[in-house]
Amino acid sequence: MTESSFPTPPSRQTASYGRGMRVSKLGYLGLGLLANTLIWGLALAYLKLAPTTYTSEWGLNVLDTAASADVTLPEGGRAALNPAGYNPVRRDPRTDYVYLAQSPDILREAAAEVDLTVQEFGNPEITTEEDSSIIGFVVKGETPEMAQKQATALYVALARRIDQLRQAELLRRELETKAALESARGQVEDAQNALASYQANSGLSSEAQISDLAVGVEQLRRQYALAVAEEKGLGSQVQQLAQDINESSAGAADAYRLQVDPVYKSQFEEYGIAAAEYADISSQLGAQHPQVVAKRAEVEGLASALEGRGSFLLGREVDQSVLTQLGPIGVDPRVAASRGELFQVAVNSRANQSGLQSQTQELSNQIGGLEGRLRQLTQEQFTVDRLERNLQVAEAIFAAAVAKLNLSDADIYSVYPPTQLAAEPTLPDEDKYISPSPVVAIGGALAGSFLATTGLLLLWANRRNSVAEEQLVAADFPFRA
């Protein structure tokens, strides 16, 4: 049997285990010291070598644009301007400004102002609050002065871009308004030309022309009515004279008795005028019109009174037809007895009757022509009124476009509200840097030391347990191959 075939004595195994454990413990202890030294060395290097970082803070106030403009236009029109300004329910313009402040173009312009790249300039920290109109900005820099310069450059670039966008929007609206103004001017010119052309081609020059023509027609109607009444009277006179000439002078005596009575003459004249007016209005309004009914009652009342007065003067009952025959004023009782003179009177009355018939025919023709002209002018006036309304509408649209163009300057802040530098960029103190932070360095080093030490302890404990298990296995199997 060889030496290796015999089991190792327990004393030698224990001694070997103890030496292994001491070596392992010293190794882990050295490794722990090395790890902690490295961790704290890195923390110290961070504090000593890392570049310092300062912050400059400033605030931008977005002003409200609730102002409006209202202009009174001709013909009672109005032009109102209500800019779509800051409305906390519908739209918050601060969102647009925050987006602009973080856009690459703004950051590039701001970085160029301080001779930095966009990466060196960094992104600003922006904060907003719901119950405030101020936007807060925090800009980082390597030195206090550089941080303040970067903050100022960001404000200048943002304000410049907002003004550029505002001017571009104003120019766009001005171009649209001018286009609408040119269109409205064209509509006004078209409406003016249409009205002038129609007035030149039509016979209507003014509204007074229609009223004057209507008055003339009414006067001709009155003349026509009087001429018709007079012509009827002369016709009756001619018939009466013929009877007087052929039969006797009794009719002339009755006519004389009636004509010398002033009451009868007055009643006869009133009846003639009323009858003429009744004939005039009945031809225009119809038999059932209230004015026609009232005038007919008046004529019947005058006729009844005339019959009563004539019966009283003649001493016998006479009707309207008899009074009409006795009514003509051409009968002269002084020559009634003379048949020759009566014949001469009849001839003259017949001539006058023919003249009145021609006059009434001419008046009728004139009335018909003027009535047709009046209807034509009335239709033309309707067209003129329509063209004038079109012109007024076109002028109102043109005036509104002019007012909108004049008010566009007042609406310059409707899309991009005005801003105000609520807080200027601050200049941080030399000892108020945010990086490198001792708190962060020490906290990180402590955390790293804790993790490294804990890990090494756990690893050492696990290793010790593994060695102990190997010793137990060796004790259970003391023989070696």
Image (cartoon, grey):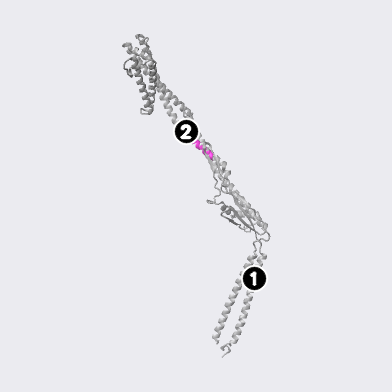
Q: Is residue 382 left or right of residue 399?
A: left
Q: Which residue does the numbered mark 1 point to in the structure image?
A: 38
Give the number of the disc on residue 254. Answer: none
Q: Main secondary structure of the magenta part?
A: helix
Residue sitting at x 57%, y 41%: 406
Q: Judge whether residue 325 can be spotted in this image.
A: no
Query: Vertical placement of 95 versus 253: above or below?
Result: below
Query: Vertical placement of 47 versus 393: above or below?
Result: below
Element marked by disc 2: helix
Q: Judge whether residue 215 can be spotted in this image.
A: yes
Question: For mark 1, does the 10 Å Cα neighbourhood hold few (<14), some (14 to 19), or many (20 or more) residues?
Answer: some
Query: Vertical placement of 400 versus 33: above or below?
Result: above
Residue 426 location (% of width, % of height)? 65, 56
**Cβ atoms under marks 2 and 1 closer than 8 Å:** no
Query: Vertical placement of 462 versus 329: above or below?
Result: below
Question: Tag 2: residue type?
Answer: Asp
**Direction right: furthest residue:** 430
Residue 331, by quadrant, is top left
Give the number of the disc on residue 385. Answer: 2
Q: Which residues are magenta?
A: 387-400
Element marked by disc 1: helix
